[in-house]
Image: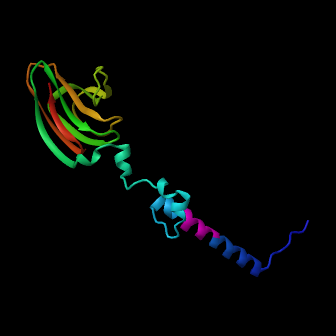
Amino acid sequence: MEHPIQSTTKLLKALALSLLIALAVFVTIVLPAEFGIDLTGAGSMLGLNALRAEDSNTEAISRPGEGDLVFRQDEVEILIPANDGLEYKFFLHMHSNLNYEWSSTSSLYFDMHGEPDGDTTGYFESYGAASVDEISGSVTVPFAGSHGWYWRNDTDQDITITLKTLGNYDVIGVKQ
């Protein structure tokens, strides 16, 4: 079976026609609907200007209010009394990342976890637990809320923790 071979002239005409159609669609439909630019008035007549989303920050849609948390780096010393425990927390938005490093004067139990913002059921999600005297890492939190550590000192001596953090967060501090 033979296929007809098109002449170069016919191919160039077809290319030019397809480019003109693409340009017409772009000017009359895409520009008004996506960018609010209506050069021909066709966007208004077809109601395409109403499709255009107002200028918005797509990050703010997926992470409400993240703009109010500035990038910061902190270092704090936390005293864990003998035979006692405490929590130290940060507020992070959903999918925010917290880099951390802490060391202590003696090994102690910790549970790194988060509690959803506004939750009243007592729900929390644990990211890790162990008994160590130092650890470092990074966590991307699955929900907005308070995230941090519970440390328990089972010794008869006070333990001091030096905690270094880096990320977009607010410090809540010692949680009572």
Task: Specify the segment rendered in magenta.
Answer: 21-29
Q: Position of residue 54 (x, y in %)?
A: 40, 54
Q: Quadrant of residue 149?
A: top left
Q: Residue furthest bottom?
A: 9
Residue 23 highlighted magenta (yes or no): yes
Q: Quadrant of residue 45?
A: bottom right
Residue sitting at 32 percent across and 27 percent down?
Answer: 126
Is 111 above or below relative to 166? above
Residue sitting at 45 percent across and 62 percent down?
Answer: 36
Q: Position of residue 74 (x, y in %)?
A: 16, 44
Q: Quadrant of the C terminus?
A: top left
Q: Is residue 144 left or right of residue 15?
A: left
Front residue of this view, candidates 63 and 113: 63
Q: Quadrant of the N terminus?
A: bottom right
Residue sitting at 53 percent across and 70 percent down?
Answer: 40
Q: Position of residue 63 (x, y in %)?
A: 34, 43
Q: Residue furthest right?
A: 1
Dominant secondary structure (helix, strand or loop) of the stretch shown in magenta: helix
Q: Is residue 157 left or right of residue 7?
A: left
Is 48 above or below relative to 145? below
Name the image colouring: rainbow
Q: Is residue 59 left or right of residue 4?
A: left
